[in-house]
Amino acid sequence: MERLVRLCVFSLCLLPFSWLAFAAIGGRLGPDPAELIMHFTGEWAARMLVLTLLVTPLRQWTRWSLVLKLRRMLGLYAFFYSIIHLAAFGHFYVGWSWVFLLDELAERPYISLGFAAWLLMLPLAITSTRAMQRRLRRHWRRLHRLVYPAAVLVCCHILWQARSDLGEALLYIALFGSLLGWRIARLYREKHARSS
């Protein structure tokens, strides 16, 4: 049962990339493929990050232990889509040029926020294995709390680049805000329970 669930979740998470790859091969990315790839991969990176943060509350609400075993996969998919998002920006928008990159950063500072979020996610992806979890021990959990500031930076990145349509940005802020608020409330309850 567990293997089947993991396989289904893995396949579902891969579907957006599969669609993008087939659309690119078939030349069906529209009049501005670069913009579509950038928006599409950034959106799915944010969605996967939301799902990753949703795992712990979902486990507490449903008592379904299997969902915890999906967290690593969802987190790695969030990083996977963020890599494509970053690579698309580097290829299509700055041509892997440091000069053009600095110009873009000066003109659009929200890019720095997105890159900072990616940098915070990088050590989480590197240390996501069980071997690294055993090696780092209690420091592993502390390190992986970086996902929360990464989520805040993602919200700022999305909101800052939003123009007239703020609906999508506000939706992500509401989702991330609710999940972060749940986490803060849980930490407060645990601290209060230990002190009483």
Image: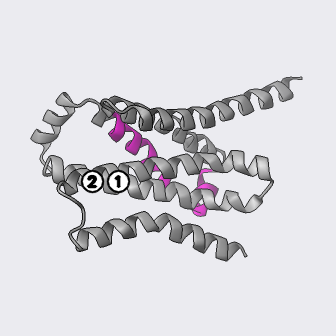
Give x and y (percent) for residue 29: 24, 62
Is residue 195 one of those drawn in magenta? no
Give x and y (percent) for residue 46: 45, 46
Q: Residue at x 66, y 71 (%)?
A: 5
145 in relation to 133, above or below: above
Is residue 119 one of those drawn in magenta? yes
Q: Is residue 68 visible?
A: yes
Q: Secondary structure at mark 1?
A: helix
12 in relation to 102, above or below: below
Direction right: furthest residue = 196
Q: Nearer the viewer, residue 122 or 135?
A: 122
Q: Pointer 2 and pointer 1: residues touching (CB < 8 Å)?
A: yes
Q: Secondary structure at mark 2?
A: helix
Q: Residue at x 21, y 50 (%)?
A: 90
Q: Which residue is mark 1?
A: 40
Q: Residue at x 61, y 44 (%)?
A: 139
Give x and y (percent) for residue 66: 72, 63
* Circle 2 residues within 10 Å: few <14, some 14–19, many ≥20: some
Magenta part, dominant SS: helix
Give x and y (percent) for residue 75: 52, 54
Region in magenta: 113-136
Q: Which residue is mark 2?
A: 36
The quadrant where residue 176 appears: top right
109 in relation to 128, above or below: above
